[in-house]
Image: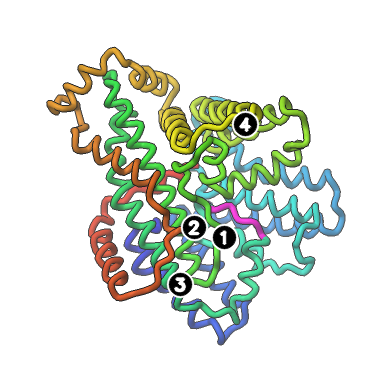
Amino acid sequence: MLFSSWEFILIFLPVTWCLVIHAKGRCSSNIIKLILLAASLVFYGAWNISFVPLILCSILINYELGRQLQRHRHKRLLWFGIVLNLFPLLFYKYLGWFSGSDFISSLALPLGISFYTFQQIGYIVDCFRNRGIANNQSFLSYACFVTFFPQLIAGPIVNHKQLTPQFDKLSHASISQAGIYSGLVLFITGLCKKILIADNLAPFANYAFSSTDPLSIIEAWTGATAYALQLYFDFSGYCEMAMGIALLFGIRLPINFNSPYKSGSITEFWRRWHITLGAFFREYVYIPLGGNRHSLAITCCLVFIVAFISGIWHGAGFTFLLWGSLHGLGLITHKLFTATGYRLNKPLSVILTLLFVIVTWIPFRAPDLATAFSIWSSMFQFSGLIEAIDALVNSKTSIYTPTQSFLMLSLLAFVVLAPNIHEHKAAPSIKRALSYSSLVMVTLLSLGQSNEFLYFQF
């Protein structure tokens, strides 16, 4: 069940919202949490009901692990819990790649396993550290923290301190009109980004990465830009829809996406792209390894390790290892450059960072290394630039036209220059309500062609 499906928009979300609103003020927080837990399991089971026992077992085991770690704080128990959490993730996502087993590779990847695994590892580590977890935390609160359906499938990776207290206040915390308005605006904006922009960019990105013929330099750059924009609007759309849905229930999720293509460095990019994943790696990997407390050389090594692990987390394959390694080298380069004391002006640094990100998205999307290197080769075949421009102007290319290329460049300039939804503070008005209603109508008419969110595969 996609956020952008008829079933979710017209049945699941309204029914769940009405049940929660009806229970508020009439029932205890536990009843409301039970409604949300049941709804979240229905939402998750609608994808594949066979995955429900796995996530329930994971919740039960980690809840008990957390309780034991609060009482005893044994390091061996903590490492046992971390390994126990990673085992299903390694089995479903990586074992087939490492072993070469076709049977294991053919197994369906449980949805959201990368996200709820990290979320629960963070929980048991915080139990061991005794960081803000109540000794009497109820099982229902913990189960809702893991399964809350707006963030279950593709994040954000939420810390228990951000979410659990909000569930405990559900019975008496009212949902304001401003909260509902903000939630609807975020949901509608995200839905439009996904359906009207990301899904329509998909064919142009897919062509470049599936073409059996060598691409021209313009085709390669246009295809790479199309994918960079598709991924941007797809993930941005998902994050805003997740935040918007949560706000409808009076729950605030952290911002997970904040105009990353405006970044003036690759370090800033990772503070803006998938913010909660970066926070997880910083809190539970980088800082425990020593963080910035070591020499510059060791710090650079730690930065590379974290980026490399990020590549592994995103997928099993040499393409993801290459992508993570390239970003690791980019982060090291920026750190070394910063240490010299020199600074680039903002526009130049933004352009260089954006070019680096677009070029390094190639292995992230490519099905194999051969395809990635082929596209890179085409992107830097400057000797064929004149012929490529002629082919584009005279519509001799296979799929791209001058108008489409211009629109993609315009869209790229828009995401770099325009304010994002979190910077836009507009009060409700009839004019805005009509505008959003029109957008909803246009978007609903396009729902039949919607694809899964790209981050669902991670």
Disc with the residue nearer the chain's start (2 vs 3): 3
How far apart, in angstroms, are the residues tagged by discs 4 and 2? 45 Å
Q: Is residue 430 above or below residue 192?
A: below
What residue does disc 1 label? 147
In the rendering, at what x and y percent does residue 349 appear?
48, 34
Horizontal side of residue 80 vs 353, given as left or right = right
How far apart, in angstroms, are the residues tagged by discs 2 and 3? 14 Å
What's the amino acid at mark 4?
Thr
* Residue 369 counted in the magenta span: no
Disc with the residue nearer the chain's start (4 vs 1): 1
Q: Are marks 4 and 2 in contact (CB under 8 Å)?
A: no
- What are the residue bounds of the magenta stretch? 156-160
Identify which residue, 156 or 84, lies in the foreground.
156
What residue does disc 4 label? 338
What residue does disc 3 label? 16
Disc with the residue nearer the chain's start (3 vs 4): 3
What's the amino acid at mark 3?
Thr
Q: Is residue 359 above or below residue 26?
A: above
Disc with the residue nearer the chain's start (2 vs 1): 2
How far apart, in angstroms, are the residues tagged by discs 1 and 3? 14 Å
- Could you classify mark 3 by the number of other residues whose Cα lies within 10 Å: few (under 14), some (14-19), or many (20 or more)? some
